[in-house]
Image: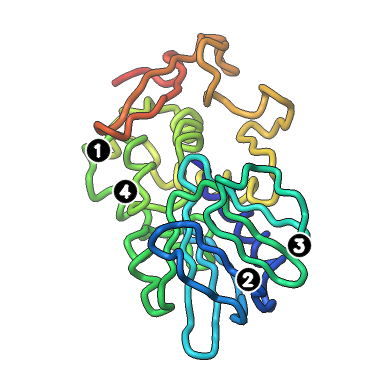
Amino acid sequence: MPEGDTVYRAARLLDRRLSGQVLVRSDFRVPQHATADLSGATVTGTVSRGKHLLTRIDDEDQQWTLHTHLKMEGAWRVYEPGGRWRRPAHQARVVLLTERAEAVGFSLGIVELLPRDREVDAVGHLGPDLLGPDWDEAEALHRLAEDPDRPLREALLDQTRLAGIGNMYAAELCFTSGVHPQTPVGDVPDLTRLVCRARQMLDVNKERAVQSTTGDLRERERMWVYRRDRSPCRRCGTPIEVETMGPTGRERATYWCPSCQPRG
């Protein structure tokens, strides 16, 4: 699943290419909005909220928000009008066409067209956004600490605690903090430092397509533990371990160094 910085870049792309333009055509290829037509409406902007995208579109009678979520496989791509799509047409869920750009949302996990005053229904449950202009570190720490017995990795992935962390950053943050992913939140030595590092990681990567938590952009050198199972730890040489963890139905591969991050 894309991380918060990936979604932030998608919002920047849509905002840059569509804002201020009038839609020549809109095509919603999802059952609940198949008859919607926003032709003639103006795109006023796109912002990210954690892993959610909010594209604001205004017509004469109504202010709309197109709420989309990439989930596991989704992506937004922008082409020149009439340009060749680089993903199959059957994967398209939304097409927004202006005179200067054609934005296509492929394999989107969520597509909702909401009246603007209902944006809160889509994102009001989220915790502080690590890349948001209203980032609130104290509130994020408060929300994480509300359940001190909860495993750290699980808490980091809970978007109602703080918004923007996915499986990759959760693994990397546990490693750089020197704690096992199953460590209870209340036992983390310095939760404030971990949250500050989380924001720093996303902030550094939000401007580049190649994500790295090590500072090295070379292939296979970008991460400390994520997807490096059986590879030697960069700090101590111990083989990285991987195990499926998480609540039933939401299990994911979790990576850690058994030496640098021993189980409690």
Residue at 39%, 79% (x, y): give it.
Answer: 117
Q: Residue at x 35, y 22 (%)?
A: 244
Q: Which residue is mark 3?
A: 81
Q: Position of residue 230 (x, y in %)?
A: 52, 10
Q: Are marks 4 and 2 in contact (CB under 8 Å)?
A: no
Mark 2 residue type: Arg
Tell which circle, 4 or 2, labels the residue nearer the N-terminal end. 2
Q: Residue furthest bottom?
A: 60
Q: Are marks 3 and 2 in contact (CB under 8 Å)?
A: no
Query: Depth check: 181 or 168 in front?
Result: 168
Instruction: Mark 1: give few (<14), some (14-19) or many (20+) Cα within 10 Å.
Output: some
* Amino acid found under the numbered disc labelled 1: Arg
Residue matched to label 1 = 150
x and y percent of residue 120 in the render? 36, 70
> Along the horizontal axis of the image, is 15 left or right of 31?
right
Using the image, tell me which numbered label, if any, was put on residue 249. Answer: none
Question: Taking the image as drawn, is residue 197 in sight?
Answer: no
Residue picked out by circle 2 = 25
Q: CA distance from mark 1 to mark 3?
A: 49 Å
Q: Which residue is mark 4?
A: 144
Indicate the position of residue 128 as horizontal and vertical percent values.
41, 59
What amino acid is labelled 4 in the image?
Leu
Residue at image point 46% right, 58% down = 129
- CA gap between label 4 and label 1 equals 9 Å
Coordinates of residue 97 in the picture (x, y in percent) = 67, 67
Viewer-proximal residue among 229 and 237: 229
* Front position among marks 1 and 3: 3
Q: Of helix, strand and loop, which one carries label 2? A: strand
In the picture as drawn, the residue positioned furthest to the front comes out as 35
Q: Mark 2 or mark 1: name the one nearer the start of the chain.
A: 2
Badge 1 or badge 3: first in the primary sequence:
3
Circle 4/circle 1 CB separation < 8 Å: no
